[in-house]
Image (cartoon, rainbow, N blue to C red):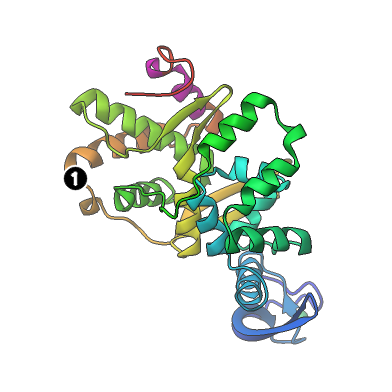
Amino acid sequence: MICPKCKSINVREEKHHHVVNLKNHIIEFDAPRMICHDCKNIVPEKELDFNAEIIQNDLYSAKYGIPKEDIVLMRKKLNLSQELFARIIGCAKKTLVSYEVGYSIPNDIYMGVLKLIRADNKMILEILNANKDGYTKEEYNKILNRINLKDSKSIVSNEELINNMILYFAENGVSKTKVMCLLFLSEYEYFKKYHKLLTNLDYINNANYLNIFTFEDIVINLINNRKLSLIYDVSLNKEMCYIKSNEVIDMTAFDPNVFAIIEDIKKNHKLLSVEQTLKTVKNNEVFKNSNNKITF
Ligand SMILES: [Zn+2]
């Protein structure tokens, strides 16, 4: 790494005391940065700077805002996908995702809305109702039926297995969509062979794309628990978002029958693009005999 200021190569990662002014609050914490030892300047480094930003946002949210974990939890308890929750509160899905992973802090309006819902989950109905004109009657009723106001957690029975599968597939850094497809294919292959469900995730073929409702939640949990890293690659023409495991999952974490299937799938799709993998999923016969929902 070369210092852009003095062109020195004497640049090293060092513990750094950050003092940041965030929305008129001073946030202080220690996190490593790249420092030039000749001119003593800070040298930008994507991953370190990104991590520092997350820590800074976490500290701010815990003290003055709303912790990202609370946002995920309240949405889960309401039984809403990121897509639907974002639509109801009126922000883009991308914005909500960045709140949930701590990449950004909700602005004052959303902060207020989220705090209201956290304090009383029935507020979601008020918000939904206030914008009733924005939905068709059908959509509105569908959302109403879906919203859960009881305090039950959305439970994924075999979260550990799914966690390990995601970490295994994301070992070398892959797009979220691809991991989601590989999970689906594992489920499909396992069912074909053993006539039993593997992940128990809800697989929905939503017209043009594949969506696993709980998948996003599990990924966010893994990111928040620092088992997965989120990597933004802006070097390509379009912005890409990858997930990469922070730990290596060894095969003994899996039942040998499961491992045989996922190892095969990972190998077969290693060199395929996201689009090619997605095509394999969509061409799967399981999609041909149901119009909306995938049932095994
Ligand atoms: Zn320098």
Instruction: Tell me the quarter of the picture where residue 18 sits.
Output: bottom right
- Which region is colored magenta? 277-286
Above or below residue 65? Residue 275 is above
For the residue pair 266 and 80, the one nearer the viewer reads as: 80
Considering the numbered disc 1 on the image, is that residue within a helix, a strand or a loop?
loop
For the residue pair 120 and 74, the one nearer the viewer reads as: 120
For the residue pair 82 and 47, the one nearer the viewer reads as: 82
Q: Is residue 27 left or right of residue 4?
A: left
**Amino acid on which disc 1 is placed:** Asp
> Is residue 66 inside the magenta stretch?
no
Instruction: Tell me the quarter of the picture where residue 186 sits.
Output: top left
Residue 140 at x, y percent in the picture: 64, 32
Q: Is residue 158 left or right of residue 274?
A: left
- What secondary structure do most residues of the magenta stretch adopt? helix
Residue 69 at x, y percent in the picture: 53, 63
Q: Which residue is mark 1?
A: 255
The quadrant of the rendered image in which ligand 1 is seen is bottom right
The residue sitting at 19% across, 28% down in the picture is: 194
The residue sitting at 20% across, 53% down in the picture is: 252
In the rendered image, which quarter contains the N terminus?
bottom right
